[in-house]
Image: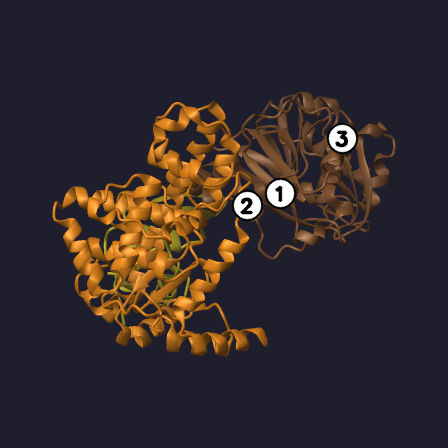
Chain colours: A orange, B brown, C yellow
Amino acid sequence: MRDARVLARLLADPSRAGAVEDWTGLLSIARAESLLGSLAWRLKGIRLPDKVAQILEVARRDSETVRTQALWEAEMARRALAPLGVPVILLKGSAYVAAGLAAGVGRSIGDLDILVPRDSLDRVQAALLAAGWEWVKEDAYDDLYYRRWMHELPPLIHKERDRMIDVHHTILPLTARPTPDAAAMIADSARLGNGLGVLSPPDMIVHSAAHLFADGDLAGGLRNLWDIDRLLREFAEADAGFWPKLEERASRHGLLAAVHRAGRLAHDLYGTPVPEIWRVRDSADSLFKARLLARDGWGRATRPALRFAFYVRSHWLRMPPLMLARHLWTKARR
Amino acid sequence: MKHRLDLRIGPVSFRIGSDWRSPLDALRRLYETYPEPDPVADFTVRLEAERVWRRWLRPSVAIRGDYVLPDAAPMALAHGLLAAEMGMNLQMALGQKRFLLLHAATVEKDGRALLMTGESGAGKSTLAALLGERGWRLMGDEFALLDLADGRLHPFPRAISLKNRAIALFDGVAPDRLGPLLADTPKGTIRHLRPGAEAIARMDEPAPPALILFPRYDPGFARAIRPVGAAEVFVRLTQASTNYVALGERGFAALAGLVAAIPARAIDYADTDMAAALVEELWDQ
Amino acid sequence: MAGPAYIADPPDAVRAVELDGLTALFHRPSGMTHILAAPAPQILAALAAKAGDAEAILARIGERFEIEAEDPAAAIAARLAELEAAGLVRRA
């Protein structure tokens, strides 16, 4: 298999399962893109070769365990932070499963990501350290870099449970050019039954698109884009006025371009219904698409030059050029 | 990838790709008598050149696949067969979620299985291999596969990796069952032994466990048998499992069921004959 | 001093198996397994969906179970802190 489009097509249209020739290759691609669980749920009930059905049945069961563990991490963070009385907002996979969204079905989840007000960071840090989390990295330079310029605390890991938590105070690094309005995101967040929050539907899309196009080298991009497909369909179906709200919010956060690109690519790869007027292609779209699909039937990452270009881009996005040079110099001297 | 081999071992199928021919040639010879692989593989292993030029210049094999260990050291091409075996181990250890996986050797007699588990170097692999030549059916030497639904053990008869002095114990077997002698590997000198014909022919026959043993080996040990309490067995088995946590309640139920129903003994032995005798004695009880 | 009140999950949230004097406990909400020694399982049962502090727990379990300690309430409080860290009880 040349690239991952066979996986994207199957996720978009499970009825194509009968046409798959190389299941081994497809499953390796799904694993490499962290989409095996999502694929397994999409193909539930579809006629499949016995061996494939068995592998996917196991994958569905495994995703249930992942879900339990993710919700538990969120609950333990809630218990540690509840006495502070600050808003604690779940982000990404943990938010999707906690809110019962389609994007959470079968989703692989690693760390717990939360968003808290910037002025509460010291108290949040203290509460987490007191409740059994500890720092992952010891290095002082990384610490200074994180605190001054990043959008999150340095990573923390729980001593007993061995799971990481990322505490964000905004959704993009402070040195990146768009400056999303974190306070507005917190103000507009929705409360779950247990007191934890999730972003409003438009803000969820903005965050996901920001993560994909405004802060990263697109590794794991197919999964991120699948999140966007699931979220857009669910939100648009529930709210006829969703699209203008999304554009308004995206503009407010300075991320309209990222959200538009997310919509175009989701439409292209997953058939996501997006407004006609969005479907004006940008010349860079084909490069993004190629990068997202850069995986072969052995599960290997392909297109090294293209990946490197996006890797450089991700650093450039985060930092003004002078800072970048200085940062890379310091890192190289280690 | 340039070269490819598919293998089926019990309920698990592997697709193995390699940038070089030699590791797969060795693997093919070792697994020559195994049945047809499944058209769909459970896991993919990749033996890759670390850097493009490392394919030819001081060839160095990086072990990759569906599941990887990020900081794993590459191996010399001369040890490519070992790299392939380690690659399969890695996929099982990190990716196997259908069965509860225990680091244990399993042998079967009269339709019931004996599970031997404990620290590395306790000689379980060697013991299982020996029992396999003395009237027992070898089900596996590295991984025991516990069925979550019915508590039976499923055979997973990979080639046994004999280390250092244990290699000499099998000088008498048919030469086509032995892999090449691999010297100076990270684990010392290794030679692979293909399981006997019966083990391969019956690789699809599970068996219920009847006894759990925790063997300990030391040339200075006196022969000893000790009972092991259920709670200790439970804890030691969770430590011997790479996927217990990932299996959630099903894993808990399967392990608790095993521990509650099956007796366990710790045995100390100073040589393999003593061990085999201890096993036969306990089995008859 | 009775200390803070705690509460545990309802009985159907855990699955317990007795193993030779100890209790192997599967906690469904977390997916974690714990090996507990007395009086921890008794404390959990006393707090199952019912809040209580160290004194209240002592009263609830005192009838069927004896705590061998100079200061039983302090012993209970120590176990409670461990159970809280493990996620098996939380502040009520």
Considering depth in this image, is A251 or B149 the residue closer to the camera? A251
Q: Is residue B278 left or right of residue B92?
A: right
Query: Which disc number belongs to residue C36?
Result: none
The answer to which of B60 and C86 lies nearer the viewer is B60
Q: Is residue B135 above or below residue B88?
A: above
- Crowding at dot 1, Cα within 10 Å, few <14 / some 14-19 / many 20+, comes out as many
Q: Chain of mark 2?
A: A
Query: Judging from the image, what secondary structure is the residue with disc 2 in?
Result: loop
The quadrant in which the C terminus of chain A is found is bottom right
Give the quadrant of residue A87: bottom left
Separation (CA) of disc 2 from disc 1:
9 Å
Residue B198 seen in this snapshot: yes
**Mark number for residue B29?**
3
**Residue holding disc 1:** B46
Q: Kindly check if marks 2 and 1 are in contact, taking CB atoms under 8 A apart as contact.
A: yes
Q: Find residue A300 and name its label.
A: 2
* Visible residue check, residue A44: no
* Circles 2 and 1 on the same chain: no
Q: Residue at 40% of width from left, 72% of height from top? A: A319
Amino acid tagged 1: Arg
Image x and y of residue B225, in percent? 70, 42
Residues behind callouts 3 and 2 on a single chain: no
User: From the viewer's perspective, is the residue at label 3 or at label 1 nearer?
Assistant: 1
